[in-house]
Amino acid sequence: MRDTLDELDRAIVNRLQGGFPLSERPFAEAAKEFEVDERVLISRIEKLLANGTLSRFGPLFDAERLGGAFTLCAMRVPADDFERVAAQVNAHPEVAHNYEREHRFNMWFVLATSTPEDIDRTIRKLEVETGYPILNLPRLDEYYIGLQLAA
Amino acid sequence: MNAIDRAIVRATQAGLPLIARPYEALASSLGLTETDILERLKSMLADGRIRRIGVVPNHYALGYRANAMSVWDVADEALEALGPQVGALPFVSHCYRRPRRLPAWPYNLFAMVHGRTRDDTAEKIEAIRKVLGASLRASDVLYSTRILKKTGMRIA
């Protein structure tokens, strides 16, 4: 994918990860930096979304600051039971994302609920359903979030 | 958070409309004025409810396939000073302090590192190790091998 990006695509991906203007004609304003017309910028963003280079365009919210409760959970699941447990875990709407990782703790998922009590309740429910204990690893402090991935 | 802010979050979490005046379109769909929308978004940006506004790249599409969660056991008294130094490294996308769960889990610092190859990522992880220096007691690296579920954050 990244080989098919031209110079303008790369510039947009690299330089528009933040700072999109809050003004009446934000694309026109942002387009100046790339020395293109607002319509060109809009159609490039459309293309980059359609071909999967971008997953989204818009405000990136800090879910925790919006309210609600979150935590990172880890489980140690035997390989021959992994698919069953993944299906059970994923079936819960509170599970926002779930990754398989190469480690004895091989399943890592994020829970998002409206209250902290719901986090505890969901963890207990998942432990009972799956039969495996869960490590509850909420964030205690955040040191930075603001990756500027280079295209 | 009030009902209007919540409505704005709901209306924009999938993205902004790709038209010349996206905030005007948003305003009319919510029965607000464009000025209302701009003011609300500015205040959410100012207080951190919005981290930033712009494009959100897809790691995999950009060739970042070696995505690792690096985890570190750092002396508690050193973490406040060292955490922000790790977070400031350009290749670290998220950096958090989390609780240890002994004996199963001794690590209290998490840093997500993205590279195009495992060698590339391993080199970046070494740079974190240097920052942590003598305050580091143990570490581990967990590469992701499969996305089992990925839904956008749903905010009610």
Image (tube, coloured by chain):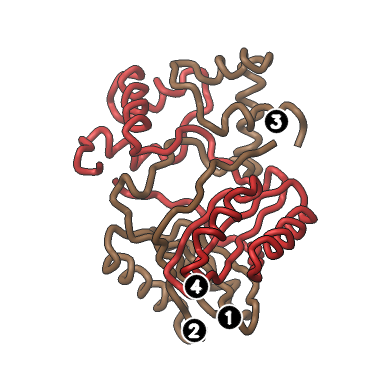
Chain colours: A red, B brown
Residue type (three-letter) at the residue carrying disc 1: Pro
Instruction: Tell me whether circle 3 and circle 2 mark residues in contact (CB < 8 Å).
Output: no
Residue A56 visible in the current orientation:
yes
Q: Disc 2 designates what residue?
A: B138
Q: Are marks 3 and 2 on the same chain?
A: yes
The residue at the point 35 percent across, 29 percent down is: A50
Q: Are marks 1 and 3 on the same chain?
A: yes
Q: Disc 4 designates what residue?
A: B71
Q: Is residue A20 above or below residue B75?
A: above
Q: Position of residue B33 (x, y in %)?
A: 65, 15
Q: Nearer the viewer, residue A90 or B49?
A: A90
The alpha-carbon separation of the residues under discs 2 and 4 comes to: 9 Å
Q: Earlier in the sequence, mark 2 or mark 4?
A: 4
In terms of secondary structure, where does tag 3 sit? helix
The residue at the point 55 percent across, 53 percent down is: A87
Q: Disc 3 designates what residue?
A: B5
In terms of secondary structure, where does tag 1 sit? loop
The alpha-carbon separation of the residues under discs 1 and 2 comes to: 8 Å
Q: Nearer the viewer, mark 3 or mark 2?
A: 2
